Image (spheres, rainbow, N blue to C red):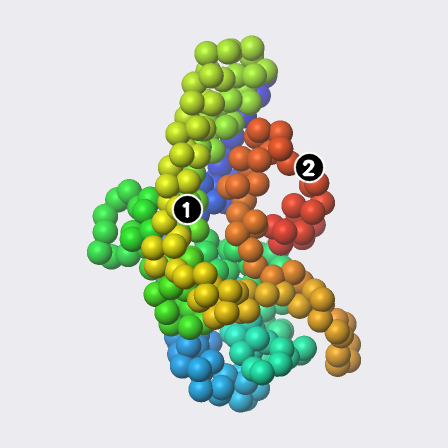
Amino acid sequence: MKHFRDLDLSSYSLSSVSGFLPERPALERLPNPYYDHWEDLSRNLPQLVASDTLKDKLERLPILSTALLDSEEEWRRAYVVLSFLSQGYIWSGDQPRRNLPIAIAAPLRRVSEYLTIMPCGTFAAYCLWNVIPSPKFGNPQINPEDFISTCTFTGSKEEEWFYVISVAIEARGGRLIPKILDAIDAVKENDTPRVRSFLEAFITCVDGIILVLDRMGENLSQEFFYHRLRPYLRGGKNMAQGGEGEWLAYSGGSNAQSSLIQLMDITLGTCQNVEFIKVRLGIEER
């Protein structure tokens, strides 16, 4: 009989240590100078947004091919950069813009198709593939202070704190995944002590997550989140259509897209609507 605990997690882009976070730190910058146009704009995004010059910069941006992206890490980095630039373009003006410049839209869609993820800002773009370990701290990285964000809209530490809190939660929950798989086997094998041991580990993990979540207010005010940051995380699902050709609109990024939290819900049997979850996770059918 095949055991779930014997599954090769790496085949699903998972880690037995970091869970849904990349086991190797995400890239801080694309190594190929060909993509410096994207990287330089993303690095200066807070200044471009504040000076209202992002629109002009992106509309004059050359169309870059994705053919020079090599590793999975590079495709993910491209997705992060293009997602931030696209969200900044749409939401940085007095009124939301309904169309993306072709130099952003075309590569973003190609990268998203490669990664089988929605071509818009998602939890993966803002957190999983954007936040990296801080060089100031060693292992294990399970606290917010252990991480830094490579891209932001505002350049504020408050925005970064929102992202690193989310990643610290993922880091604390990563080691739970192998235990979940073993617990499934334990249920099938009628092994009550193993199931009880798993539930105790589950409770400990949730307690740790709550401790991290409770720290959100330490460096992030409600006013900043709702008035400065949240607007950039919105989607275009409810915007009126405009322009010619195929029109695509998506829901915005949300911590509800955390695969870890969804997995925990599913494990406990609290997942009610699978189709809704797939939409919130940004999952497209292969």
Relative vertical location of residue 275 with respect to residue 233 in this rendering, above or below: above
Badge 2 crowding class, 10 Å Cα cut-off, few under 14, some 14 to 19, many 20 or more, is: few
Q: Position of residue 249 (x, y in %)?
A: 70, 66
- Judged by depth in the image, the label closer to the viewer, 1 or 2, is 1
> Which residue shows up at 60% across the image and 50% down it?
281
Question: What amino acid is found at the position of numbered circle 1 in the picture?
Answer: Leu
> Which residue shows up at 53% across the image and 78% down it?
92
Q: Secondary structure at mark 1?
A: helix
Q: Position of residue 75 (x, y in %)?
A: 50, 61
In terms of image quadrants, where is residue 66?
Answer: bottom right
Q: Separation of disc 1 and disc 2 at Cα?
A: 24 Å
Query: Looking at the figure, which quarter contains the N terminus?
Result: top right
> Which residue shows up at 50% across the image and 69% down it?
227
Residue closest to the eye, 261 or 133 = 261
Q: Is residue 118 visible?
A: yes
Residue closest to the eye, 228 or 97 = 228
Badge 1 crowding class, 10 Å Cα cut-off, few under 14, some 14 to 19, many 20 or more, is: some
Question: What amino acid is found at the position of numbered circle 2 in the picture?
Answer: Gln
Q: Position of residue 136 (x, y in %)?
A: 22, 56
Q: Which residue is mark 1?
A: 213
Q: Secondary structure at mark 2?
A: loop
Residue closest to the eye, 41 or 1 = 41
In primary-sequence order, the first of circles 1 and 2 is 1
Q: Which residue is mark 2?
A: 272
Q: Position of residue 205 (x, y in %)?
A: 41, 33
> Which residue shows up at 36% across the image and 49% down it?
215
Q: Is residue 110 visible?
A: no
Residue closest to the eye, 221 or 114 = 221
Relative vertical location of residue 274 with respect to residue 49 in this rendering, above or below: above
